[in-house]
Image (cartoon, rainbow, N blue to C red):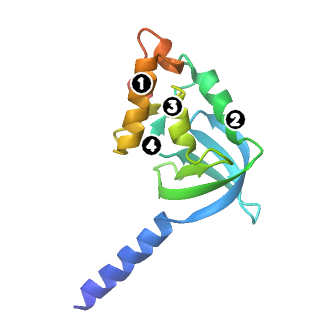
């Protein structure tokens, strides 16, 4: 019985940590799905956008994707909702920036990222990617786009 109680408490604690939400000020953009920010204690933190994978540096549309993310969030206070941490120690987050309620969704809508189905099964993200493909926007204007996970 004690094992079940301990397991329950640990699961509740893990869920609480994963659902953590806080504000940060974005100080740097690495690429179209990764950024650096400082929290209220001036601690620098690296973040990875939830549910998307943007073009790698040497891929077509990499600079466009990076610039769009920069335009949306660089220098701004944003709200992040933590989903997990990746193997590189980055917090995997959903980002809200002003009127943009979900920056990952916006990047998909603009055709500047792929839905990262390996790590996310959000139907809305799949739908946004499909709509961008059909409308031939962003990276979908390329006749033969290569997903970042295949490019790596």
Q: Nearer the viewer, mark 1 or mark 2?
A: 2
Q: Which residue is at a point 41% across and 24% down the rendered structure image?
A: 147
Position of residue 3 relative to residue 92, above or below, is below
Residue 90 shows up from this direction: no
**Marks 4 and 3, the one that precedes in the sequence:** 4
Q: Which residue is at a point 33% across and 84% down the rendered structure image?
A: 6
**Mark pair 4, 1: CA separation:** 14 Å
**Mark pair 2, 3: CA separation:** 16 Å
Where does the C terminus fall, quadrant-wise? Answer: top left
Residue that badge 4 annotates = 51
**Mark pair 3, 1: CA separation:** 16 Å
Is mark 1 in CB contact (under 8 Å) with mark 2? no
**Marks 4 and 2, the one that precedes in the sequence:** 4
**Marks 4 and 1, the one that precedes in the sequence:** 4
Residue that badge 2 annotates = 70
**Marks 2 and 3, the one that precedes in the sequence:** 2
**Marks 3 and 1, the one that precedes in the sequence:** 3
**Marks 1 and 2, the one that precedes in the sequence:** 2
In the picture, residue 5 is in which quadrant? Answer: bottom left
Residue that badge 1 annotates = 147
**Mark pair 4, 2: CA separation:** 18 Å
Q: Nearer the viewer, mark 2 or mark 3?
A: 3
Is mark 4 in CB contact (under 8 Å) with mark 2? no
Apparent side of residue 28 relative to residue 54 in the rendered image (left or right): right
Q: Which residue is at a point 44% across and 30% down the rendered structure image?
A: 114
**Mark pair 1, 2: CA separation:** 21 Å
């Amino acid at each position: 019985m004690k094992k079940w109680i301990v397991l329950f408490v640990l699961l509740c604690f893990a869920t609480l940590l994963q659902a953590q939400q806080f504000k940060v000020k974005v100080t740097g953009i690495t690429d179209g799905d990764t950024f650096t920010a400082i929290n209220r204690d001036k601690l620098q933190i690296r973040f990875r956008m939830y549910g998307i994978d943007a073009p790698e540096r040497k891929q077509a549309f990499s600079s466009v994707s990076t610039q769009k993310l920069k335009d949306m969030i660089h220098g701004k206070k944003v709200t992040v909702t933590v989903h997990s941490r990746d193997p590189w120690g980055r917090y995997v987050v959903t980002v809200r920036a002003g009127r943009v309620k979900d920056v990952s969704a916006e990047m998909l809508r603009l055709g500047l990222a792929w839905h990262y189905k390996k790590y996310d099964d959000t139907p809305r993200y799949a739908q946004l990617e499909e709509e961008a493909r059909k409308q031939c926007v962003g990276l979908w204007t390329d006749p033969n786009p290569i997903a970042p996970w295949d490019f790596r």
